[in-house]
Image (cartoon, grey):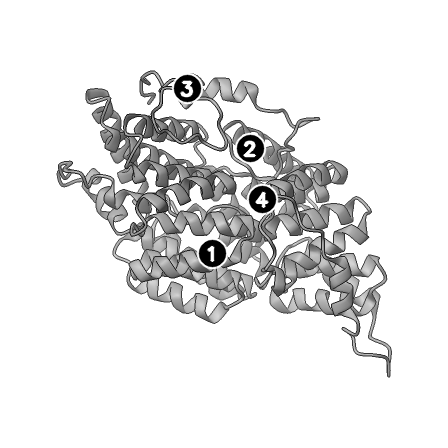
Amino acid sequence: MEIEEREPVPAGSGRAVPAGPRSEEPVGERSPEASAARSPEPSGARRSPLGRRALIGAVAGCAVLGGVLVLLPSLDGRGAARPAPGPVARAVSAVGAGVPAALPDLTALIHDREARVRARPRDDVSWAVLGVAYTERARRTAAAASWPKAEKALRRSLELRPEDNAAALEGLASLAGARGDFRAARQWGESAEKLAPKRWTTYPALIDAYSGLGDHKAVDRALGRLLALRSGPAAQAVAARVYRDRGRREDAAAAISDAAAGAAGAPEQAAFLTQAGDLAWERGDRQESLDHYRAAVRTDAHAYDALAGQGRALAALGRTSEALRAYRAALSGRPVPRYALELGELYDTLGRGTEARTQYALVRDLARRDGAAGVDDEPVLGLFEADHGDPRAAVREVRAEWQRQPGIAVADALGWALHRAGNDQEALGFAVRATDKEHGGDVRSALYAYHRGQIERDLGLSGPARRHLAEALRINPYFSPLLAPAAREALTALGEPPAGGPPEDSGEAADEERAAPPATPGAPAAH
């Protein structure tokens, strides 16, 4: 349902409306249709729309509790009446605890606020609530039309109340993060923090922004502030994500277990169970991950990430018919490029090339749709292009992304694209950055280790290659239906290390130092 927009504040009016880093014109001046018309097409355009694997989706995109609906606890805090018992009240209650609302209740909340802003078009609080709810719906269901609606509503709130409007600033931070624009998310989030440093709802969005930019010291500072202000399930789930990125798997598992134990409603419990399933999958525990994913779907039928997780785990267990059904169900409820790519690669392993190509075409269509809505998927898109399209185009696109936001996922994607394009020497520098603790590459990623091992193998660095390929398979022997077998084949081809030779990692520290990429102008320093 479209909401009639009031005229935006004109430039130079003197009102303190921060300029959005991504959009240079007031949102009310451009319709979603106009945005789509101006968006680049995949061939020869600035952004190449494609998609990628499960781990990248977890790292690069916004996480389940990345600060979207956690904003609403304080949005109605300036004297607004409490909603009557029912779906709207349940939605407000859920988000008051910083956790997801049930999708039917979220829809009811959207309808309620749409009606309210029609009746009171200068109600900045309701505009902010509406914008945050649109963002959550877009993230949960991939409803592309909700992204521009969210931006319009949040900017309308900020125009109506340009000062002392932390709710709208937080909403814009979470919207930018959900779209993958981490620089914008940082700018909006830091503005909200400066205005109201004790609002705990600011920090999940900031943590996601800093993670996407590779600023790991800032992540730690923001997490410390969050935990000092909040100790409930939502904060524990955010902490679990940070611990996972630091390679602290046991701490991550404990934190998400505590969050699940404290869950009060079905959607939040499903979100925590999905996060627990992701942790189990990343360490190669197929059955445990499947158990968590199934429990999540039993708890909330709209847990589409858990459905895709079931597909991943079932495929690794050899139960391919069930895996295909799970992926199709996930795509039906939340059509995103990552699910289509995983399903396409599964078809590839089954020798069903026609169906695989159909899914790869769907990846492109979905990514083009997302690009028109302002969603930035460059790390995932670059990896897809490198493996299934034009590696040189992937290098161009991901290198530009590295200049904008040099996070760990982008470093891995750029390294792999360079390798596939034949530039292994430069590729190794980025692969080192993605896996080197000194640069924040602490996450235990089978995919990152595999990429680095294959690059080293092609450079003739047999010892390091053997070590990283073996590490990938130790972390998760099933990390990809296409790449895990390739890792085993590469190890076999490398053979055993020479008897009586030097240690496998002899001289590797010096190789890493030489391979490290140069500092990026404007990017956070590597720590």
Near mark 2 (Cα within 10 A), the count class, few <14, some 14-19 or many ≥20, is many
Q: Which residue is mark 1?
A: 219
Residue 162 in the image, given as x and y percentages of width and height: 31, 30
Which tag, 3 or 1, sits closer to the chain's start? Answer: 3
Which of labels 2 and 4 is toward the front?
A: 4
Residue 125 in the image, given as x and y percentages of width and height: 24, 33
Give the distance between the C-alpha atoms of the residues marked 2 and 1, in whole angstroms: 31 Å
Q: Is residue 133 left or right of residue 347?
A: left
Q: Which residue is mark 3?
A: 11
Q: Which residue is mark 4?
A: 405
Secondary element at tag 1: helix
In what quadrant of the picture does the C terminus appear? bottom right
Give the distance between the C-alpha atoms of the residues marked 1 and 4, in whole angstroms: 15 Å
Callouts 2 and 4 close, C-beta under 8 Å:
no
Which tag, 2 or 4, sits closer to the chain's start? Answer: 2
Mark number, residue 349? none
Q: Which residue is mark 2?
A: 366
Q: Residue at x 29, y 38 (%)?
A: 106
Residue 352 in the image, given as x and y percentages of width and height: 68, 43
Secondary element at tag 3: loop
Which tag, 2 or 1, sits closer to the chain's start? Answer: 1
Secondary element at tag 4: loop
Give the distance between the C-alpha atoms of the residues marked 4 and 3, in whole angstroms: 28 Å
